[in-house]
Amino acid sequence: MHNKLTRKDIEDMQKEIDHRKLVLRPQLLDEVKETRAQGDLSENFEYHVAKRAKNKNDSRIRFLEKMIKTAVVVEDNAAEDEAGLGKDVTIYIPEEDVEETYTIVSTMRQDSLNGFISIESPLGKALMRHRAGDKITVRVSDTYSYEAVIRSVRRNEQAEDSDIRQF
């Protein structure tokens, strides 16, 4: 799968990779060396913790490098009043009589529990390029969909400047 990322996402990921390689990796390698010198490795809890931290850092570096390598760069060409990347969209769902606000973000920044939905999610796809007042159909699966009405669309500057969410 190719993740749809903005140029800023890729730039932020590269900064994290550089930090992990140039700052964290040497520190973690030093910790592994120091704890290894403390004796019997089978009973050395600190060594196993240090080794696990080093491996986790290396794993994160590989993950980010793969994300960048396989990324599809997306640009937001939506008009100011249209739903698009970095926009807060308030919708009304008549079926549940509820109003909700979401921020549309790239796949790397998604965090649906905190209101950040991906342009690849069913709701994100349905919202793209629509304006306040438009009625949309969100297709969740082949057998279930629901209607929503867009109440407002506005730019969210914080969504564009926030750091990549880490797992």
Image (cartoon, rainbow, N blue to C red):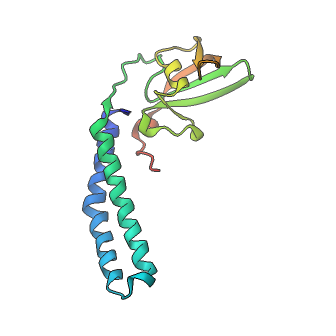
The residue depicted at 48 percent of the width and 20 percent of the height is 83
Q: Is residue 102 left or right of residue 59?
A: right
Q: Is residue 157 left or right of residue 15?
A: right
Q: In which quarter of the image is the N terminus?
A: top left
Along the viewing direction, whichever of 105 and 79 lies nearer the viewer: 105
Image position, residue 125 (x, y; %): 49, 21
Along the viewing direction, whichever of 26 and 88 lies nearer the viewer: 26
Q: Compared to 61, does 113 lie above or below?
A: above
Along the viewing direction, whichever of 57 and 88 lies nearer the viewer: 57
Q: Compared to 13, does 70 lie above or below?
A: above
Q: Quadrant of residue 145?
A: top right
Q: Compared to 68, does 147 lie above or below?
A: above
Image position, residue 136 (x, y; %): 58, 13
The residue depicted at 52 percent of the width and 14 percent of the height is 131
Q: Is residue 134 left or right of residue 70?
A: right
Q: Quadrant of residue 91?
A: top right
Q: In which quarter of the image is residue 159?
A: top left
Q: Is residue 125 left or right of residue 71?
A: right
Image position, residue 49 (x, y; %): 43, 72
The residue depicted at 36 percent of the width and 19 percent of the height is 77
